[in-house]
Amino acid sequence: MDKLPRVGFIGWNPFQFLHIQKLASTFPGACFVIEKRKDFIDEFSEEVLKNPATPIMVWDRAKMPTLDGVFDIIVCQTPFSRIETFEKSKIAMIQYGYAKEPHNYGPWRAFADLCLTYGPYASKRIDYFSPTAATGNPRYDDWHREEFHSQAKRKLADKLNPDKKTVLYLPTWGDLSSVDQYIDAIYALAENFNVLTKMHHNTQLLEADRKGKIASGSIRHFGANDDLLELLAVSDIVISDYSGAIFDAMYCRKPIALLEADLDDQMGGKKIDDYSLEYSRRDELGLRISSPEHLHSGISELANNPHKYISGYEPLRTELFTATNDSLSLAHDALIQLWKGKYIPSQPQIYVRKELKEFYTTKRQLAIAKKKQSVVK
């Protein structure tokens, strides 16, 4: 067998683990490093923590620099603590979604020696900061297997009334979330539909009050350790707001209801701007729901005319996702090529990374100095 690189996958929540689990399994000896943040380890299920295919290692944030050189390649979704200090290990970033463009295509991408993207749209925007490979999403490969759909239906059969269509609610977190405004209308759908909800992983970890609102009703609730793809497999309609889950539903060709919110205070911020797909191309993505009072009629429209709304986003779907049923092999091979030296940052990418490292270093030094001053006082 050809020698393979030593690969470590770094993250801090269950969503990140589930996202990379398939890819990690293609590298014998790979492990998932949980960057220890407060008590977030408590949010991981036993099934995840004791997964025999990918060993788990919990690592203190302050000691992250000691991992440099332990792995040939480190794969992450977003920057981890002290990423600016890494010189020996190659850094590969794997795209985690298509929403929130001000963050998704930010200069932090310059820390990567390679970004694995879902398709040409993302690659075009990240190419300014780092090399890219449009491999698709390895997690989506299961969607093309009949056995996966059969297993999902068997697993969730006892939670569904076969005489009703199934609606899946996938809200985002923070100021863009629709939960506070729409949750009562979501519960009311249960009279005519199977209703499933899956809260955003950051809601589960960071928003205790909102988590309580989502989990307090009589409908079926799922969290960060549950597989979104399985839920999509049994759902007829998806409801979201400004979440990246919109694009998971699009990939799986589900009709989408888009809950509207007042964005006056959010536009141009760190999460959404005029370029963001969930705003700029919203009319193509699905049926826009202007208020809770219009939700039931909107869901009925989607249930009666699903293909109208699916065909509406098909051109954009082609732009966003690389056409493949084997993204796993493409992503694995791209990491091998990174290890072998194929991907070399360009001159502008090197300059951006240099400035970014200096910025992160200075920012950390200022934070330490501020903390020392507060202790003295």
Image: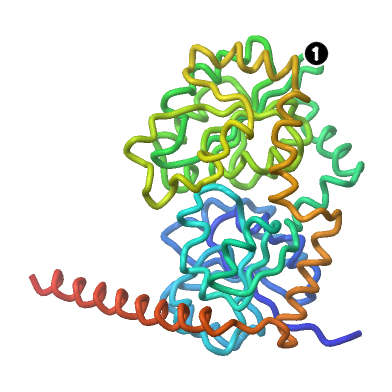
- The amino acid pointed to by label 1 is Asp
In this rendering, the answer to whether 100 lies above or below 110 is above
Give the camera-side residue of 318 and 224.
Answer: 318
Position in image of residue 357 (x %, y %): 41, 80
Pointer 1 local density, CA inside 10 Å: few below 14, some 14–19, many at least 20 = few
| SS type, badge 1 | loop
In this rendering, the answer to whether 320 lies above or below 303 is below
Give the camera-side residue of 364 and 8.
Answer: 364
Residue at figure coordinates x 60%, y 78% from the top left:
113
Q: Quadrant of residue 158?
A: top right
| Numbered circles on residues, count | 1
Q: Which residue is mark 1?
A: 163
Position in image of residue 51 (x %, y %): 72, 60
**Left or right of residue 330, residue 171 in this image:** left
Residue at figure coordinates x 54%, y 21% from the top left:
289
**Left or right of residue 292, residue 296 in this image:** right
**Left or right of residue 210, residue 28 in this image:** right
Residue at figure coordinates x 85%, y 38% from the top left:
149
Colour mapping = rainbow
Classify the position of the N terminus by image quarter.
bottom right
Classify the position of the C terminus by image quarter.
bottom left
Position in image of residue 334 (x %, y %): 75, 73
Residue at figure coordinates x 70%, y 39% from the top left:
250
In this rendering, the answer to whether 377 lies above or below 197 is below
